[in-house]
Amino acid sequence: MAADSPLSRRGAIGGLGAAGALALAGWPGTAAASSARDALITVMGTSDLHGYCLNWDYFKNAEYENGDGDHIGIAKAASLIKQVRAERGTDNTLLFDSGDTIQGSSLATYYNTVEPFTETGETHPMARAMNAVGYDAVALGNHEFNYGLAHLDAWIEQMDAPVLGANAVHHGTDDPAYKPYVLKRMRVTCTNKPGRQPLVVGVLGLTNPGSIIWDRRHVEGELEFRDLVETAAHWVPIMRAEGADIVIVSAHSGDSGTSSYGEGLPVENASAMVAEEVPGIDAILFGHAHRDVPERFVTNRVTGEDVLMSMPSYWGRRLSVMDLALRRERGRWRVVSKSAVALDANTVEEDPDVVAAVEGQHATAVDYVNQVIATSTEELSAARACWTDTAIVDYIQHVQIETVRAALAGTPEGDLPVISIAAPFSRSAVFPAGDVSIRDMAGLYIYDNTLLASELTGAQVRAYLEFSARYFEQVAPGAEVDPERITNAGGTPDYNFDQVAGLEYEIDISRSPGQRITSLTLDGAEVADDQRFVMAVNNYRQSGGGGFPHIADAPVVYNEQIEVRQALIDHATETGTIDPADFHTPNWRLVREGGPVFE
């Protein structure tokens, strides 16, 4: 193996344990290698690519860069894939993806909604890229349903690889709406026999039940989404009966056993439950949670066998590589050992075949994000947004409130007051006076959050605000105030200072945390503890990010999977003018014993 091979580097992903460290030393010295093995196959996987083909940040108009040194895009992953295929042997490798493929990047957005490929006849950039790489199967993610079933069908038609989703069935039936599984017939190198020996690998695709909520407008009355465990329990024996020597599951579902919605639907993050409860599965490639899980073993309760699991982060920044050592016994193959690692995309250059496949579409998307979408009547800056109510943050609040209010019209929650939370993500965000581009909007809202809304009581909103107010240092009345030094108390980041729009309140920073919200009113009347509100929030906060009280358990009344950033872009484009007189009404301030800290 070459010294600069990605499989020889120990720095791919930390926390692999002994098995992971051995695997990075390469083949045949992997943890899955065994003196008892007759063959070794390698299963590679990506997940949550979200339309990222190239290592490009469309909102900064530059190559992607973050504090961890990550690189992104399927073109980067493709170079890793080529190297693994060269080292393991193409006949001994498979490549799968576990979903959330066609939605996310500005490149994907352009061909989904701006100039939809379904109308122009273009090939979707993710079909171009994935076909250039050569996937063996791809599972459906929940975001595949964002644009409707006809849109999804058109993308599937363009894909060379089969697209799988066993637990999505036609409404009112048990009939799969998509191909449930595929059997890959391989001929693998065998250590004790000449030539190549036949091997059948079955891959089952499972998607996320939450799509019935998140994309109700597209799937209601058309599709149902069944429990992942029950679905796997049905199909795995069928796959085995049809000759599968090995069974891999590609699941767009996290491993925590939790859900972001109520108990009325099957579990959202059920991959570990599938491993525990369904016998006959050798390994699971999983996604949806956007985490690095290079290698995890879950013991099946029925057989006592360990199921190998791997999640390769998101946007193509990692490649899961799972090695399965096999032994031939009584005419059948058996897995005798397993291991997995995650390889890092920043160790390779972009694959030229993928670059060539999408470079024209990429150029179109770059032009798009640099378009001017509105005119700002004045410069709006976030420089003071961490200690004063600013117009630029209120623009986020305004769009979120208007979006939720319109969606709830005519519903049981339609008459409730709608409030909103937003945080100062970037102190350097600016709308210049004059032309505002899509990139300017992205500089304000730097995260890929989606918009939700939950129902909370007045008491819960007050507790939420008290938690947020911990962001400030305690400053005695009369003491000198340095705005740069009163924020980020206890290391609290700016993005965890949530500001609420739609209510009026004061934060007394002379008081101890937990006792700082000294006034909380709606239209001049004190908010009652049992008063009901609809609060617009982002998915990170609603899922428990930041540890804010009540929000993760509050009933969700709106979740259409709209990206907040895209909602801002759409609003600016529709109105054409950003005028703070239309949306900025200062509704909160810092005080000490009732006196304002800042005029």
Image (cartoon, helix red, strand yellow):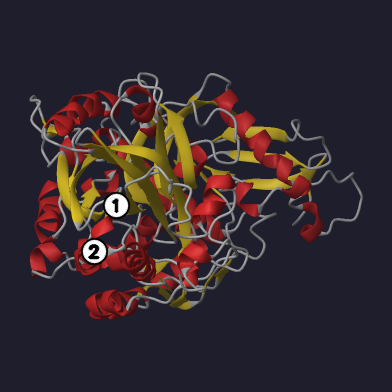
The residue wearing badge 2 is 130
Q: Quadrant of residue 123?
A: bottom left
Q: In the structure shown, which secondary structural element does the residue marked by tag 2 occupy?
A: helix
Q: Is residue 538 left or right of residue 516?
A: left
Query: Which quarter of the figure is the C terminus placed in?
Result: bottom right
Residue 462: % across, % down: 62, 30
Residue 54: % across, % down: 36, 72
Residue 425: % across, % down: 57, 57
Q: In the rendered view, tell whether residue 246 sits above or below residue 39.
A: above
Q: In the structure shown, which secondary structural element does the residue marked by tag 1 occupy?
A: strand
Residue 98 visible to an observer of this rendering: yes
Pointers 1 and 2 in contact (C-beta within 8 Å) = yes
Q: In the rendered view, tell whether residue 515 sits above or below residue 287.
A: above
Count of numbered tags = 2
Q: Is residue 13 left or right of residue 97?
A: right
Q: Residues within 10 Å of mark 1 (few under 14, many from 20)?
A: many
Residue 289 visible to an observer of this rendering: no
Question: Which amino acid type is marked by label 1?
Answer: Asp
Decide which of 452, 521 is in the foreground and name it. 452
The residue wearing badge 1 is 97
Question: Which amino acid type is marked by label 2?
Answer: Met
Residue pictured at 28% horizontal, 45% vertical: 141
